[in-house]
Image (cartoon, rainbow, N blue to C red):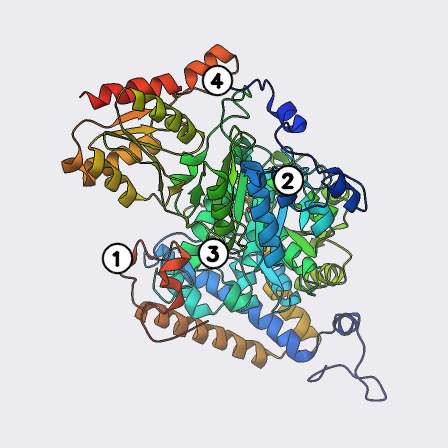
Amino acid sequence: MSNGKARDIWGEPVRTSASARFDRLGLKEEDLHRLLYYLKLCRYFDERMEMLYRQGRLPGAIYSGRGQEGTHVGTGFALRREDVFLGTHRDLSVQLTKGLELKRVMAQFWGRVDGYTRGRDGNSHVGSFAAAGTFAVVSMLPDSYPVACGWALAFKRRGEERVAVAMCGEGATSNGRWHESLNLSSIHRLPAVWIVNNNQWAYSTPNRLEFSVPSVAVRAEAYGMPGIRVDGTDVLEVYEAVGDAVERARSGEGPSLIESVSLRWKGHAGHDPARYVPREMLDDYMGNRDPVKRLQDLLMSEGAVSEADAGALDERVKKEFDEAHDFAQRSPLPSGEDVTRGLWTEDGYWDSDPRGDGRTE
Amino acid sequence: MTTEGDTSVERGAERSPEVPQASPEEAAKDEAGAAGHGAEPRGKRSAEGEATFLVAIAEAMWEEMERDDSVFLMGQDIGVYGGAFKVTEGFLDRFGPERVMDTPICEETIIGTAIGAALAGMRPIAELQYADFIANGFDELVNVAGKHHYRVGERVPLVVRGPSGGGVRASSFHSQNPEPWFAHTPGLKVVVPAFPTDAKGLLKAAVRDDNPVVFFEHKWIYRRIRETVPDDPDFTVPIGRADVKREGVDVSVISYGAMVHKALEAASDLEDSGISVEVLDLRTIWPLDTAAILRTVEKTGRAVVLYESHRAFGVGAEVSAVLAEDGFDLLDAPVVRLAPPNVPVPFSPPLEDAYLPQVEDIVDAVDKLSKW
Ligand SMILES: Cc1ncc(C[n+]2csc(CCOP(=O)(O)OP(=O)(O)O)c2C)c(N)n1
Ligand SMILES: [Mg+2]
């Protein structure tokens, strides 16, 4: 760690517990900068999109992930390009961290042909295995879990050192296919990691009305796999837990379950004021456990990031958002004539670019 | 519909009365000594070289697995046990547990896993112990498999197959014909063959298809219908093409699945009374071969749509609508639907017989229509 760092009497940097942690996690200064960049990007994206929604300038729905960026970015950052991620409506930030292009995601929100679904789907129901190794989100919760089993099965069968990582909210764990998937993955020791983003609310339903066990993580035992609970507002803790689970899966030791706890700062979707969330709880999380601020404060106190660095990152994400927004507005809307195309593979709709500019993924 | 003495499907399956056991020579060849086990399904053809519908299905899967390493099977009790109907008997020994994967009882996750594997470049064939259990996996098929390519352009080449249909005294949970559920759903091809050759060729085509295919095998046909089936490993029957199984000029019976056999029986009865019936076997429910439907009615001017799934809002409605919209000028009489009422499949023989269209019902309907 460099600038402004405390030094001992021999001039060597003081090895704080935080810097020891960075070393243990193998995170170099540029990695920490990137981590902070993604946290800021996802936060900024979330805030600006909400603003556009409130102004009536964004069609469709938004599902804010604000307050949960630690879980999202920590997960995306722990995966390799060749690993696959299968998430939900609320964890678009994982997909952005894993490599979806911001401009094409924005084009998706505005129903444009440059969106990954070419206007066939909207909002965060997006993803692309070709572009980023991510599954286009399916609303039904958690339909991604069984699909992740299939990817993991293929990886195992072909002897590939790749991992399928699925994420859903704690509410989705009440659904049978969540349990079926953990069970199947454990029986066959599939290279899968199951992450549950416990933001303490499923729409308006609190944890105590979703399950009567003390945590989601304890359920791991029932399926014969390790389960841990981490602080989802600490991106490093998530990164470490996901990294360990992914390596375990990669080395053939089977699946694990990670419950990452944070709080959903906004309502279920843009229309929901979430009055059912107690004010004190919200104040506590927003005031003391802001995942973006936590990492920034830590990196500043460690001298890994300066005020100027942080300011530059803020400028960068704003600029990137504006450019992506412009791109989305300029991207053409799809033609109504194409409505029946692309259902079957035979018609070739997806083999060529609808604008004919030859772009391939 | 009367049956040939089966009172229980599962018992019937285990008795395997029509599946020849391996000859002593064959058994001797089998190192493990387990008669038939580990042997190719072709070894189960009759002495005359005919395959039952069931054996034809097994041949199709066996050949496709030999051809393409990415093809694999998953389902309940398909390994050591060889499947509830013994379709996959011998597969485990030949292909191993990774390609003949016994799963827990979790249809939703079986189908979802097949989707994931398909997206990852594999070609899964998921077996349902009975087609009825597809209801437990409905969501993954309808909301994921059927929509995915339209939404994102990523291919989901999978086959979900299972035994459907009634007439075997198996009541409402083991006799359904779920094909209209999926024909109504975008993005799924739905195949319901009636003959061993078609079953073999269509299943091979389904495995090679880049789209999700739902494939129903009428269990009444499994061991009753046999014929000589092609040996060419690249023999396929195109999905989406109907086939005229009997030519005629007076009335068309448009049908599929087990009802095709009832239609053929009725047609030969009617021949004696001088009525010439053309039997069109749809083979694929969706995409529907509308050209073939119009072609047969152009010839006869009269159509009975005969099917075993529920009467209302189903295959009959669709075929009738095709004729009304595009074949109005061809028709000399109204289209008649002959199908079970919209009630669950009942168990007791008089009830089930009343439920299913019988040969006499077909004869009556055709006779009446021919006089219209
Ligand atoms: C099977 C299913 N039922 C209902 C819904 C409607 N729905 C969408 S999000 C949601 C709440 C999900 O809560 P949780 O799993 O905790 O995820 P979060 O939204 O908190 O991230 C519900 C009920 C759905 N998407 N899927
Ligand atoms: Mg939640």
Residue position for label 2:
B44
Residue contact at pointers 4 and 1, CB within 8 angstroms: no
> How much space separates mark 4 and mark 2, taking CA atoms?
27 Å
Q: Which amino acid does label 2 sit on?
A: Lys
The answer to whether marks 3 and 2 sit on the same chain is: yes
Screen quadrant of the C terminus of chain B: top left
Depth order, front residue of B358/A260: B358
> How much space separates mark 2 and mark 1, taking CA atoms?
53 Å
> How much space separates mark 3 and mark 4, taking CA atoms?
39 Å
**Helix or strand or loop: what does disc 1 sit on?**
helix
**Looking at the picture, how far across and down is residue A101, in whole percent?**
47, 70
Q: Which amino acid does label 3 sit on?
A: Asp
Beta carbon of the mark 1 residue lies under 8 A of ligand 1: no
Depth order, front residue of B208/B176: B208
The answer to whether marks 1 and 3 sit on the same chain is: no
Question: Of label 3 and label 2, which has the lower sequence position?
Answer: 2
**Helix or strand or loop: what does disc 4 sit on?**
loop
Sort mark 3 into few (<14), some (14-19) or many (20+) by Cα contacts within 10 Å: many
Determine the residue positioned at 22% across, 33% down: B300
Depth order, front residue of B94/A50: B94
Q: Which image quadrant for residue B45?
A: top right
- The chain identifier of the residue carrying mark 1 reads A
Q: Which amino acid does label 4 sit on?
A: Thr
- The chain identifier of the residue carrying mark 3 reads B
- The chain identifier of the residue carrying mark 2 reads B
Residue contact at pointers 2 and 1, CB within 8 angstroms: no
The dot on residue B2 is 4
Q: In this view, does A89 lie to the left or right of A82?
A: left
